[in-house]
Image (cartoon, coloured by chain):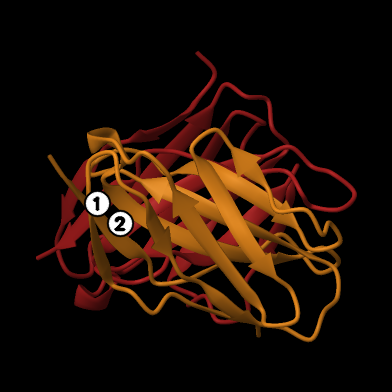
Amino acid sequence: AQTVTQSQPEMSVQEAETVTLSCTYDTSESDYYLFWYKQPPSRQMILVIRQEAYKQQNATENRFSVNFQKAAKSFSLKISDSQLGDAAMYFCAYKDSNSGYALNFGKGTSLLVTP
Amino acid sequence: DAMVIQNPRYQVTQFGKPVTLSCSQTLNHNVMYWYQQKSSQAPKLLFHYYDKDFNNEADTPDNFQSRRPNTSFCFLDIRSPGLGDAAMYLCATSRDSAYGRNEQFFGPGTRLTVL
């Protein structure tokens, strides 16, 4: 089974600064999808950004961007101009394009944003 | 707003007493999922429905069952909860696509306590 590793259990960033959350994954597949989900305290998980493995261009959504390194199996999330509302648990997730519907999640990184 | 609703948000049950968690969606998505998320761990897929087709993950205990009477509703039944079943249970939905790229939309979760 594919594994997703988030090596940073907790991260802290000051408001308006930039922070990068790390994620690596293990797969033998060439076609797959990668996601970053955000889970604020006591609120539902929402999708932040998605990357298709066949696309070389890094995905960007407003202040959120990824650094996708396919050969290194690395998928980091960069949050620019951090805001207090960015404080949450962030999960990296992997999905095969060909086998089933399961999302394989990492253990998450808890992001603290300080004023 | 279209959404995924889970009831109740908090559920307390006794060891061995059957419990049912419910999920409803207004998104009209044909795929519905149940995840178990234990403290400080990644969400783990228990099973999913593709329309009325039930798909159990290989390592989901027999103690967990599910029903989907119609497109909008899905239930998680725990026949004899043990202390190890205390967790957050997340319901999610997605619209089917040939390549599985569609994001999953999550409900806020039901936190189950087993006494």
Question: Which amino acid type is shown beneath numbered disc 1?
Answer: Arg
**Closer-to-camera residue (A72/B7):** A72
Q: Which mark is residue B111?
A: 1
Q: Residue at x 36, y 38 (%)?
A: A81
Is residue B68 something one can see in this rendering?
no
Crowd class of label 1 (few under 14; some 14 to 19; many from 20; radius 10 Å): many
- The image quarter containing residue B8 is top left
Q: Which mark is residue A31?
A: none
> For residue B69, what is the image quadrant?
top right
Instruction: Say which residue appears at 75% left-offset and 42% top-offset.
Output: B51
Subunit that carries the residue with mark 2 = B
Colour in which the image shows chain B: red
- In depth, the one of A31 and A11 nearer the eye is A11
Chain ID, mark 1: B
Residue B6 shows in the view: yes
Place of residue B29 in the rendered image (x, y in percent of width and height, measured from the top left):
69, 32
Q: At which x and y percent is residue A89? A: 32, 55
- Image quadrant where one finds the N terminus of chain A: bottom right
Q: Name which residue lies at 83% across and 56% down.
A: A55
Q: Is residue B5 left or right of residue B19?
A: right
Across and down, in percent, residue B20 comes to 36, 48
Is disc 1 in the same subunit as disc 2? yes
Q: Amino acid at mark 2?
A: Met
In this structure image, what is the colour of chain A?
orange
Dividing the image into 4 quarters, which one contains the C terminus of chain A? Answer: top left
Mark closer to the chain start, 1 or 2: 2
Q: Would you say the residues marked 1 and 2 are in contact, meaning their CB atoms lie under 8 Å apart?
A: yes
Residue B63 percent across, percent down from the top left: 43, 72
Left or right for A29, reference B36: right
Q: Is residue B109 above or below residue B48?
A: above
Helix, strand or loop for disc 2: strand
